[in-house]
Amino acid sequence: MEFRKMRRAGQLLEGKECIAILERNTAGVLSLLGDGGYPYGVPLSYVWQDGAVYFHCAKEGHKLDAIQNSPKASFCVIDQDQVVPEKYTTFFRSVIAFGCVQILEDAQETQKALYALGKRYAPGETEERLAEEIEKSISRTTVLKLTIEHMTGKEGIELAKMRKSAQ
């Protein structure tokens, strides 16, 4: 599929900047095709690992039903949103990733993703405690993987100008 080019190319972030945004943030909105053809956007915690985005969820629900009906998705992460009232604008920076979501079936990949999520959200936890938590919850947990086919990042024109003048 041919993805659209971003209209305001001067505000486009490079791929490495998009990845840095995914690495440093902890929440985004996963958008799927939901019930009745309505968009379904759900805020989720995530981890970026091995060039993909991983999420976890329960064994059933709206999100899983939507993925089973159509795995195509977008995932948006807002890195910055500073309101600047005197300029009637915001200094923003965000990333949108497009791709397909799969429900992980492979036990090893599932364990690896849960471990990465655990390290991300409980960074001081011991290996033993993390392993216990994963073992305790794995039977009631589904792990999802968003394989990215296209990604764009954009920042406000003011931020783009500041970045270019600093180079």
Image: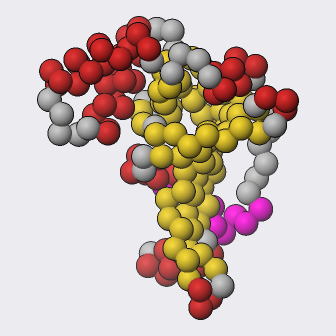
Q: Is residue 38 left or right of residue 167?
A: right
Q: Position of residue 11 (x, y in %)?
A: 64, 67
Q: Is residue 113 visible?
A: yes
Residue 10 within the magenta-colored segment of the rendering: yes
Query: Which stretch did the figure color magenta?
Result: 7-17
User: For this rendering, which residue is in front, 47 or 9?
Assistant: 47
In the rendered image, the quadrant that contains the C terminus is bottom left
Give the left or right position of residue 56, taking residue 64 as reference.
left
* Residue 16 inside the magenta-drawn segment: yes
Of residue 12 and residue 21, the one placed in the foreground of this image is 21
Which quarter of the image is occupied by the N terminus? top right
In the picture, measured across the screen, residue 78 lies left or right of residue 64, that is left
Give the percent coordinates (x, y) of residue 148. Answer: 60, 34
Looking at the rendered structure, the number of numbered marks drawn on it comes to: 0
Above/below status of 22 relative to 62:
below
Q: Residue at x 37, y 24 (%)?
A: 114
The residue most toward the bottom is 86
